[in-house]
Image (cartoon, coloured by chain):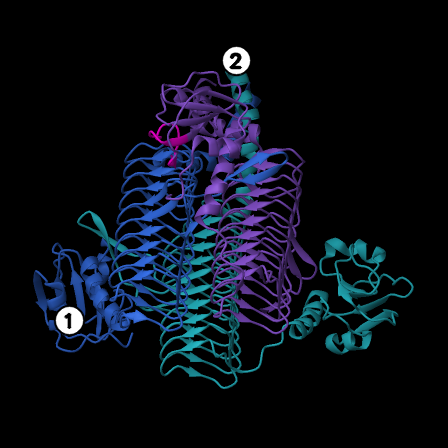
Chain colours: A cyan, B blue, C purple
Amino acid sequence: MKAINFTVEELATIMEPIGRRGAYAGPIMGIAALDHAQAGDLSFLGNQKYRSQVAQTKASVVLVPSDYEGEPLPNQLHLVVENPSASLARVCARIEAKLWPRPAPGVHPSAVIGEGADIAPTATIGPLCVIEAGATVGDNSHLQAQVFVGQNARIGRDCWLMPGVTVGAECILHDRVRLHAGVVVGSDGFGYEFVGGRYEKVPQIGIVIIGDDVEIGANSTLDRARFSRTVIGEGTKIDNLVQVAHNVIIGRHCVLCAQVGISGSAVLEDFVILGGQAGVAGHITVGKGVKSGARAGITSDIEPGAFVHGYPAIPYMLERRLQVLQRRLPELFKRVSALEDKA
Amino acid sequence: MKAINFTVEELATIMEPIGRRGAYAGPIMGIAALDHAQAGDLSFLGNQKYRSQVAQTKASVVLVPSDYEGEPLPNQLHLVVENPSASLARVCARIEAKLWPRPAPGVHPSAVIGEGADIAPTATIGPLCVIEAGATVGDNSHLQAQVFVGQNARIGRDCWLMPGVTVGAECILHDRVRLHAGVVVGSDGFGYEFVGGRYEKVPQIGIVIIGDDVEIGANSTLDRARFSRTVIGEGTKIDNLVQVAHNVIIGRHCVLCAQVGISGSAVLEDFVILGGQAGVAGHITVGKGVKSGARAGITSDIEPGAFVHGYPAIPYMLERRLQVLQRRLPELFKRVSALEDKA
Amino acid sequence: MKAINFTVEELATIMEPIGRRGAYAGPIMGIAALDHAQAGDLSFLGNQKYRSQVAQTKASVVLVPSDYEGEPLPNQLHLVVENPSASLARVCARIEAKLWPRPAPGVHPSAVIGEGADIAPTATIGPLCVIEAGATVGDNSHLQAQVFVGQNARIGRDCWLMPGVTVGAECILHDRVRLHAGVVVGSDGFGYEFVGGRYEKVPQIGIVIIGDDVEIGANSTLDRARFSRTVIGEGTKIDNLVQVAHNVIIGRHCVLCAQVGISGSAVLEDFVILGGQAGVAGHITVGKGVKSGARAGITSDIEPGAFVHGYPAIPYMLERRLQVLQRRLPELFKRVSALEDKA
């Protein structure tokens, strides 16, 4: 956090506020939630739930939306911005770049580079990486340390592969892809035939293609297709410990929370959001913009735009109603007994 | 996919078809499902569900079972085989061997080999592997890159350990074991005693034994026994992100889908199949040939051959019936109210 | 297991028994459960469930609690101890230290050490580790192999980081922390703003702090805070494949079983125990000493001391009762039909 040291004017340059109320002259040395902030901190109203905390916060600078009209305390500045969370993200990105600047381009002498691998001169290949024959790494991409890139795999521009990432042979990452530590791209799909009393492996000779601006969380696994492709669409964000099986097609700008599992050949259309620990059965289609609650188990096609919960997943309002009635089962049994006594 | 280029006669040599209908003279350049195939592709009828698609497919060669009697289109060949999926697997295995031939035997100069490690001359130890003292690696086994093998561990013949695999000290892999990237074999079992207000570790000094022809998916974890052994039986297949706790005994030819968790000292007899995200409680026995639905939570012994669903897992037909009745709870509440009104 | 070879007097020195019955003069060569033990084995009565097995066991030495009064067989010794499991753990710890002695201090020549990294002379840095600039490693700590420690991260004393562990930049491990293979500490929290039809990343610039005596299982992932800290309290034990999201605060001496997921900004107070595959929603508080069943889904604040089950998690006795009534739904539907027929 040592990297945080901004003047108010530096903040204003980053965020281009549409209004200001009050004043603060000192430096900004930290970032904190409204109720934890101290003098010298930057805070923000990102969720209407916390609206009442703005008046009490000790933060020196507060990012507020245009519909917030409260007055700042003495020696406190309100910067009015369109989207306080997004503005804060821009500040954080600045801090991140200060904290963790990409190291100088070049290949660390301890890395092992296969024959005919094509590494852009502006890329950084960190210590103890292995890049097999025929693989390519694009401009400004950063393989941090102990990364493995299999033969003929292609890493685009401005990617960041963190320690211990594995990208299997022939797989393709487009640009600005960020893979956190331990991600595995291109493990074999789980396919066998039961022949003569034992399972024979069905070789998995397809690939994984990952679109622009995809980010994948630590230790998540994405299987290569049986043949053809497993696809992660542009802008999709995947959390930690998520499983994506072979031949899955995930659309653009989807969000998969931690520990989600997607079975083979399932299709997620664009803008799907799946809560943590949810699961999707194989060979089904989850329509555009579908949202699921945490732990939902989606077992059949879901219409675009639906909001589903439970296992098997059903529309949220129905699931909620059934849940309420389930809680009332003891009462129902008593009511039926009473009726029987009268009858 | 560049590796795919077969003549019809090459295919026939691999598959030994029991019959042929129609003819195709060109090369086979790809593999695809019936409804996606194009001219030049090989396709197959592996599931009766897709039977009607055979007549419409554009594939140039189609593998069909002996009970399929439809006629091919012009310039299309039907190869009649006993099991189209198994035949396709044999073709894919050929393609896999072309795509990813095992590298030449030998130890990469960047690997770190401990004292007294015994590595077969026909084995391949890839870059940046660590093999500790006293470990052995058998004939033709391939440690791809950045693999760790702990002291006195034994890797059998014809094994393939992919990047970032860890095999802990003293653990034993038999022959033809395939571990995908990031698999951990031999992490400590999760055992503590609560003594004096805090948890004291119970050291885990047993091992893991993995039978012949076992395959384990990316980032799965298998704990060593408290003492004695955690066992994975011959031919068992485990998908990605699966957890196998200490002292678990898994039989032969079981199938554990992704994100399954098996608690300590549970026993799975032979031919058990567990759906994705299922869980098994500790110290129970799942009988031979049991199948569970995805997400089943097995909390007590299950009789051999049962098919269970739900949490706690119960026989499928019962679980299904209860589910239907749960959906009818709103109706039931109304019916009871109506009876009360009349009474 | 070759390391096991104790005389009865050596065992007595380790365990300081409060009583003895019978006698055994030979060496102890193994450890086994009561019903599997053979002559030469040490066994123990750790769970009242197995009380009747003591009289039949073939073990040569049996650890029994003070309230066990049965007599040993000929050539068999009962050592009376306060807590047989804890005593066994002390023996196992001795075996563990014999089996896997910490290697000599020093930095392996294949490790890559960044500028200004501060490594205690008593620490052991194994082969192919990467320690970035400014990181510190304390006395007697052991980074086994292929470990990554990011810039300015701090590893305390007597820690053990197993193969393939990643500790991200700026993160802090206190003393005696044990991280199993593949653990990721300090991956980015999962935070985005939806702006202009796509997700903008919210940089995650906080850290993870791990207290004394914490142990974390293989391939578990712990995200760094958005800003400020993700905290794991002293003495907490975390199993394999567990996900801890950004800004989570976990108290002291908690137990998280395998495949648990904790959503962002959740708080677990001290002594919480979560069963396998359980989940905790974001921004809620789980009170001191709460226990949850396996697969519980905790969606709202839980009072200290509660024992909860199910999803959404409710008190165990209530959940159990509802489960029983759900099983009786077929009967209830029939009873209502019978009433309707009469009415």
Residue C312 seen in render: no
Q: Quadrant location of residue C151?
A: bottom right
Label 1: chain letter: B
Does residue C238 sit above or below B93 in this rendering? above
Residue extent of the magenta highlight: C29-42
Q: Quadrant location of residue B164?
A: bottom left
Residue B114: say if magenta: no
Query: Residue lying furthest right in this view?
Result: A74
Label 2: chain letter: A
Does residue B176 sit above or below B263 in this rendering? below
Q: Position of residue A72 (x, y in %)?
A: 87, 63
Q: Determine crowd level at label 1: few under 14, some 14-19, many 20+ residues with C-alpha closer than 10 A.
A: many
Q: Position of residue A181 (x, y in %)?
A: 51, 64
Does residue A107 sit above or below A239 in this rendering? below
Residue A222 is labelled as none
Q: Main secondary structure of the magenta part?
A: loop
Q: Amino acid at mark 1?
A: Gln
Residue B76 is labelled as 1
Q: CA distance from mark 1 to mark 2?
A: 74 Å
Residue A341 is labelled as 2
